Amino acid sequence: MELKLSSENFEKEVLNSEKPVLVDFYADWCGPCNAMAPIVEELATELNEKAKVGKINVDENSDIAVEYNVMSIPTFIIFKNGKEEKRFVGVRDKEELLKSF
């Protein structure tokens, strides 16, 4: 199951994580984000031992979106050791995201 991320838990769950973290920057009104939701859920299940998967709503947490220069959604950022490792913008297939781990 994916983590619900916010400004309050982002540092603990993402930046201080011992595992890599895939963060899905999304909004409820975003059609492509909604299309990606089942894929993100599958990734959370498949990567369970290897990495964490979290979602952060850019409307509710605009400070985090601004900090990471998220200009378009969906945006997926993989964090490793508290730093951005890789970024994907727009709809992606599951295999493309999976092979980044």
Image (cartoon, helix red, strand yellow):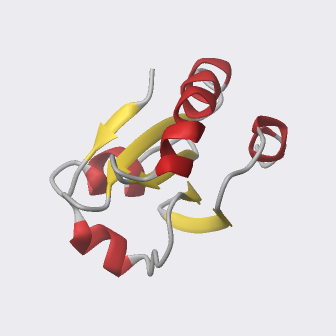
Q: Position of residue 30 (x, y in %)?
A: 43, 53
Q: Is residue 59 above or below residue 27?
A: below
> Which residue sits at x=56%, y=50%?
32
- Whole-percent x and y of residue 97? 74, 45
Residue placed at 24% from the left, 61% from the top?
59
- For the point 50% across and 63% down, the residue is 73
Relative to 87, residue 76 above or below: above
Q: Nearer the viewer, residue 99 or 57?
A: 57
Assign the N terminus to one quadrant of the image.
top left
Instruction: Name above or below for residue 25 compared with residue 85.
Output: above
- Which is more toward the observer, 25 or 29? 29
Percent x, y of residue 95: 84, 37
Which quarter of the rendered picture does the C terminus lie within? top right
59 sits left or right of 70 in the view: left
Depth check, front residue: 97 or 90? 90
- Tell me if 19 is positioned left or right of 96 in this view: left
How many numbered badges does the structure rendering display? 0
Quadrant of the rendered image containing residue 11: bottom left
Q: Is residue 100 left or right of residue 80?
A: right
Residue 8 vertical position relative to residue 99 in the rendered view, above or below: below
Query: Which residue is drawn at the image coordinates 53% and 57% (left, top)?
Result: 74
The percent position of residue 18, horizontal first and vertical second, equals: 49, 43
